[in-house]
Image (cartoon, helix red, strand yellow):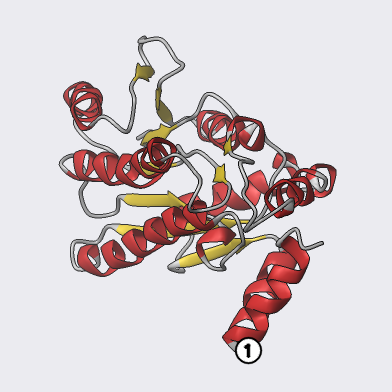
Amino acid sequence: MNRVVVISGATSGIGKALAKKFEADGDIVCNLSRSCTDNGFDYKCDVSDEAQVNAAVGKIGERYGRVDILVNNAGIGISGATELIPMDDIKKAMDISYFGALYLTRACLKFMKKGARIIFMSSIAGLTAIPFRSVYCSVKAAELMLGESLRMELSQAGISVVTLCPGEIKTNFSANKLADVKTSERYGKRVEKALEKVTSSEEKRMSIASVIDKIYKICVSGRKAMYIIGGKYKFLYFAKRVLPTTTYLKLTDSMLGGRE
């Protein structure tokens, strides 16, 4: 029997590539996205709107009677000096990446039984602090904690919960993020330079093709609570765990903080 797979944000990037992998395996893929049009498998839905999420998942449940795999993939990037980023942008990031995942998980759980799987697409930023990306790090850390807590809550029900923490991957994610370069005497050119540091490494990022098979395999059968995608990011996380926190933060700030 084909699995019923729900993926948020499957119109581009990792979500789109994952959808193709599931479809090639004969699964039924239901994409929830603001940019798609309602049809048999695409459900136009703003995941930050709980009512829209409940309505879309309700249609999926009514049509198929179950959800076998949920991939919480929708998200948005955000960067800038914490005190200067507009609060509306901060709330938007939290609404899409965290509350969107929470709404979708709660809605899909109504149609999930033993053997079902829930995947959270967090980020390496959810494991390590980055200057001028505090909001993004906080949102992804919250998503990670949501996944790990749910793993314990749902263990007796036989529903698996896995969180992925990818490093930087070449997608249109960076181009669409809320990048705020406003500054003040307190920061000078650091905000802009920190952003330039991130964007200058675009070509060095992992390609979707190089990681999608691994991500797909984890979504289907991964058993660990959390997976880091990318060798250098595993080393980064290792360094964070073994170095004194103050030392690690100073090193990170020197590399990514846009210091003059």
Which residue appears at 69% of the width and 69% of the height? Answer: 253
In this view, the residue farthest toward the front is 185
Asked where in the image residue 92 lies, by quadrant, the reply is top left
Quadrant in which the C terminus is drawn: bottom right
Is 171 on the left-hand or right-hand side of 199? left
- In the image, taking residue 259 as reference, residue 132 lies left or right, namely left
Q: Is residue 9 left or right of 55 when viewed as pictured?
A: right
* Residue 22 screen position, x and y as percent: 51, 35
Q: Secondary structure at mark 1?
A: helix
Question: Is 145 on the left or on the right of 36, as rendered?
Answer: left
In which quadrant of the rendered view does residue 142 lie? bottom left
Q: Mark 1 — residue?
A: 242
Residue 114 seen in the current view: yes
Considering the image in quadrants, where does the N terminus appear? top left
Q: Nearer the viewer, residue 29 or 26?
A: 29
Question: Percent position (x, y) of residue 31?
Answer: 41, 26
Give the image location of residue 100, x and y in percent: 33, 39
| Residue 127 vertical position relative to residue 82 in the rendered view, above or below | below
Type of residue at label 1?
Answer: Val
118 is higher (above) or lower (below) than 128: above
Rendered residue at 32%/59% (across/down): 146
Label count reads 1
The local crowd at label 1, few if under 14, some if 14 to 19, many if 20 or more residues have their Cα within 10 Å, is: few
> Which residue is at 61% across, 33% downward?
13
Residue 122 in sight in this render: no
The one nearer the camera, 224 or 202, is 202
Q: Position of residue 2 (x, y in %)?
A: 38, 33
In the image, 249 versus 113, the foreground residue is: 249
